[in-house]
Image (cartoon, helix red, strand yellow):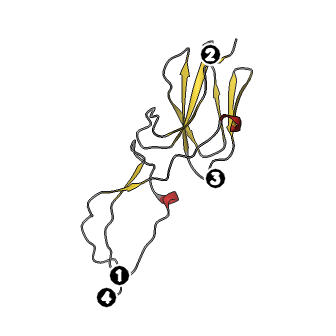
Amino acid sequence: MATKRVIIPNSELIPVDANNQYLVRFRVLSDDRNRFSEWSPIFSIAGAGVPVLSEARVASFMVGSVVNIIWEGLPAGSEFDIFVGYDGDQPSYHGTTSESRYLFINSAEENYRFAIQVSSISKTYDQFLQIFESELIDVV
């Protein structure tokens, strides 16, 4: 019986949970794929720390009614959840992107604020996963 070691990079894991942990489990297959084990228990693996992003590296501007959010300095290939709140409300999930920009249409509200978070399974506003949060931006 040969022993094989498999390493799965973080980029191939599902997004972290609300505690910034990857949830993983595995099963063992024989080389001929005729025999396999039961699934292992679920293991929690600490996610990478939340990147620190200073305000000087994020910009937001409007072109007509389209809001553009752009940023730099975050790891390439990472996914980010974007949360948007209107008129002083707490931000709610708006979308996920793996690019260094995000666009959305601002409806008739007078102001908005946004937050950028590490992408997670739950898609809830969580300051533990937050990379950046803007001040309230007045569009009038």
**Residue 41: % across, % down:** 26, 60
Label 4: element kind: loop
- Disc assigned to residue 71: none
Amino acid on which the number 4 mark rests in the picture: Met
> Disc 2, disc 1: CB below 8 Å?
no
Q: Where does the image place residue 100, in percent across and percent down from the top left?
A: 66, 43
Q: Which mark is residue 111?
A: 2
Using the numbered discs, state the Cα–Cα distance from disc 4 to disc 2 in whole angstroms: 65 Å
Pointer 2 or 1: first along the chain: 1
Task: Give the residue number, with chain letter if any, for mark 1.
Answer: 32
* Pointer 4 or 1: first along the chain: 4
Which image quarter holds the N terminus? bottom left
Residue 18 versus residue 115 in the image, above or below: below
Instruction: Check disc 4 and report the residue beneath it.
Output: 1
Residue 65 picture quarter: top right
Q: Which residue is mark 3?
A: 76
Q: Quadrant of residue 110?
A: top right
